[in-house]
Image: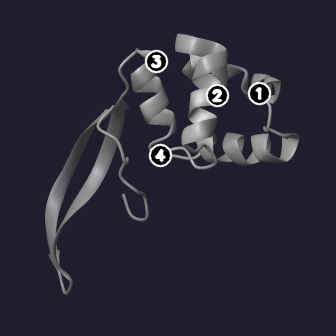
Amino acid sequence: MTGYDLPRTDAIEILWEGEWQSSKYGTQLQILQWEEIVPQTTEGITGYLASGLLKGIGERTAEAIVTRFGLSALDVLEHSPERLLEIRGITKERLEDISLCHDSP
């Protein structure tokens, strides 16, 4: 897991598997696989969206998404991201950035 930021929230939990490796830079944990555990509450989903794991979505946008779609916000992002255009301030260009970032690991 090189180059990924850890979430900036306590709203979600990350489970990971990895192994410690020594190199010229010292001992580092190499993450082999990871999974986010998002509480199915409005606070949990808002925290996840605003955590930095999904680029293109900041705190205000996360709040707007959850206000509009509630507990189905993650389902909308995954299956119908074009519905984000219903939110004021999200343009087609911004939606493309969000969609591209969401599809990447």
* Left or right: 62 as drawn, with respect to 88: left
Q: Residues within 10 Å of mark 2 (few under 14, many from 20)?
A: some
Quadrant housing the N terminus: bottom left
Q: Amino acid at mark 4?
A: Leu
In the rendered image, the vertical position of residue 69 relative to residue 48, given as above or below: above
In the rendered image, the vertical position of residue 25 relative to residue 74, given as above or below: below
Query: Which of the two discs, 2 and 4, sits closer to the camera?
Result: 2
Identify the residue position indicated by label 2 in the image.
Answer: 64
Q: Element type at marker 1?
A: loop
Identify the residue position indicated by label 1 in the image.
Answer: 87
* Left or right: 17 as drawn, with respect to 3: left
Question: Which badge, 4 or 3, comes first in the chain's sequence?
Answer: 3
Identify the residue position indicated by label 4 in the image.
Answer: 53
Compare residues 99 and 45 and report the one nearer the observer: 45
Percent from the top left, x then y, of residue 90?
78, 37
Q: Element type at marker 2?
A: helix
Percent from the top left, x then y, of residue 77?
64, 26
Instruction: Give the residue at x 67% y 17%.
Output: 68
Q: Amino acid at mark 1?
A: Ile
Marks 2,1: beta carbons within 8 A:
yes
Q: Which mark is residue 42?
A: 3
